[in-house]
Amino acid sequence: MDLFDAPEDDRHAQGAPGLSHGKRPLAERMRPERLEDYIGQEHILGAGKPLRRQIERDELTSIILWGPPGVGKTTLAKLIARVTKCEFIPFSAVLSGIKEIKAVMVDAEKLRRMGRRTILFIDEIHRFNKAQQDAFLPYVEHGDIILIGATTENPSFEVISALLSRSRVYALRGLTVPEIVTLLQRALPVVGLAAPAELLEQIAIYANGDARQAYNTLEAAGAASSGGELSEAAVQDAMQRKVLLYDKGGEEHFNLISALHKSVRSSDVDAALYWLTRMLEAGEDRLYIARRLIRMASEDIGLADPRALEQAIAAMQAVHFLGIPEGDLALAQAAIYLCVAPKSDAAYRAMGAVHEDVEKTIAEPVPMNLRNAPTRLMKAWGYSEGYQHAHQLEDAIPDMECLPPSLAGRRYYWPTDRGVEKRIGERLEEIRRLKEKKCP
């Protein structure tokens, strides 16, 4: 690879949609030419944000762009090169090795001597091994290149520490439905179509934060539409599924999650699977569903089956690791487990009772017996006086009171007689009997 003979396609990949683009994919044709036209990532590119200031002041250092597919990592790198008037060299971690790295670096050094700066963009930098990443270090340190790495994997684990310490990491987020709809509206004239807002929103929901996926769906649906109007049937064919009316931020969103939650609480496996599938097919954020399943595990099952929370957390991790569609099965598995698990809201009610007391009673000082006494003076003041260390007792059950005096003896947690919580209740009764025996 030679910087002075970069492929023409790469040099013009940022061209305006109105230019002749041959058969290049719609996602490539729609790359903006101006930073002002870039959609999303306001948390790092909004007015006054760190990366925006670096670009506008032309003070860019090496950076790592970390985020899911299709959120604009490559587009942003190209825009940075355009705004800062740097040579832009794309480099694939999949196709290149140390030999290619060194060849490119020789040319970058030549450019620097000519007064021209080079941005080396490495897509999927996490695919480079340690030795390959090490090869960049001297060139980054000497200022021969400004390195922009893109990765879908956590750079803390996939990028060597030496390279991380010389770069700033920016986390990019999945695009919102309104942001993707805006991109699709811009693309309609390019594909020569008109489309109702509802269909664009369905494509955006299906894309699940991935602009490239949205463009590909629009392009495929547009090719199957006739009369200059995007059709619902063509969109269904492009997505290979039925279009479900669903608004991720509106009433139907909350109706469906409510139906799922109440089906789980009611131990109705079939209904839970139905409502879960409705949400999945409509493009709901998988991690949102996982968060709600975790909530159900604590709120509606609790200690009646402590493994319910483990199952829900495991499902969340599986979804994050596997993505769509493989991770969907983990959500279904967790939903089934939560349905058949014994139910208890005792922990939920206990927290509610505690909150009520905290709101209605004065905030009493922590009793002296529960305070640490790290200094001699604090010990003299009575800190830690009367504290009974459980592990120094034969049964490991002290009889001291741990609540403030005004709430002494108060009971908040009343376990049910279902599942594991039945055994917990029996143990609590045993603890109380042992404490009563020790009281004078």
Image (cartoon, grey):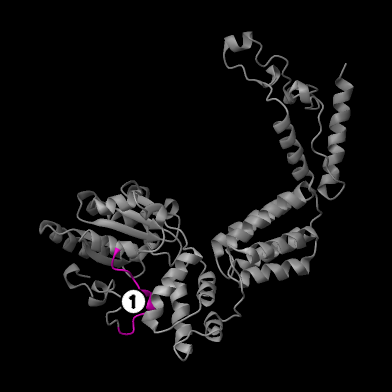
Toward the viewer: 375 or 12?
Answer: 12
| In the image, residue 18 above or below residue 224 | above
User: Residue 84's quadrant in the figure?
Assistant: bottom left
Label 1 belongs to which residue? Answer: 29
The question of residue 32 being in magenta is answered with yes
Q: Is residue 1 visible from the viewing direction of this image?
A: yes
Residue 311 appears in which quarter of the rendering? bottom right
> Residue lying farthest bottom?
227
Residues 286 and 428: in front is 286
Dominant secondary-structure state across the stretch colored magenta: loop
- Kind of residue at badge 1: Arg
Tell me the crowding category of disc 1: few under 14, some 14 to 19, or many 20 or more residues within 10 angstroms, Cα based.
many
Query: In which quadrant is the C terminus drawn?
Result: top right
Left or right of 402? Residue 280 is left
Q: Would you place residue 204 above or below residue 258 in this image?
A: below
Seen at 24% across and 65% down, the residue is 88
Magenta span: 22-34
178 relative to 364 in the view: left or right: left
Give the image location of residue 382, x and y in percent: 66, 11
Which corner quadrant holds the N terminus?
A: bottom left
Say whether residue 261 is magenta: no
* Residue drawn at point x = 48 percent, y = 88 percent: 225
> Where is residue 404 shown, x and y percent of the image?
73, 23
